[in-house]
Image (spheres, helix red, strand yellow):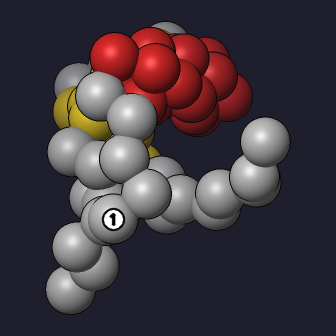
Amino acid sequence: MSVRTFTAVIHKDDDLFVATCPEIGTVSQGYTMEEAVDNLKEATELYLDEFPSTNFMLY
């Protein structure tokens, strides 16, 4: 298994933190920054399990 590193862009929206992975397009949220990142990791892992690809278009 290869290790891939992705970006997490986080912003606060009212009382929630919203985390986005721009390379994959996954988005998640949480009440803390850590929770938002953990949820984003899970969402991204599930997405990549469903749609495996080694060819990512990076801009």
Q: Decide which of 19, 45 is in the foreground and name it.
A: 45
Q: Residue furthest bottom?
A: 59
**Vertical relation: 29 (above or below) 6:** above
Identify the residue at image location x=39%, y=35%. Answer: 52
Q: x, y (%) of residue 17? A: 39, 30
Total labels: the figure holds 1
| CA neighbours of label 1 inside 10 A, class few (<14), some (14 to 19), many (20+) | few
Judge from the rendering whether residue 21 lies leftward or rightward of residue 37; answer left or right: left
The N terminus sits in image quarter:
top right
Could you say where residue 39 lies in the image, as x and y percent from the top left? 52, 17
Amino acid type at mark 1: Asn
Nearest to the observer: residue 35 or residue 58? 58
Residue 18 image point, x, y percent: 32, 33
The quarter of the picture where the C terminus appears is bottom left
> 8 or 3: nearer the eye?
3
Residue bearing mark 1: 55
Quadrant for residue 50, please give it.
Answer: top left
Above or below — where is 44 with respect to 5? above
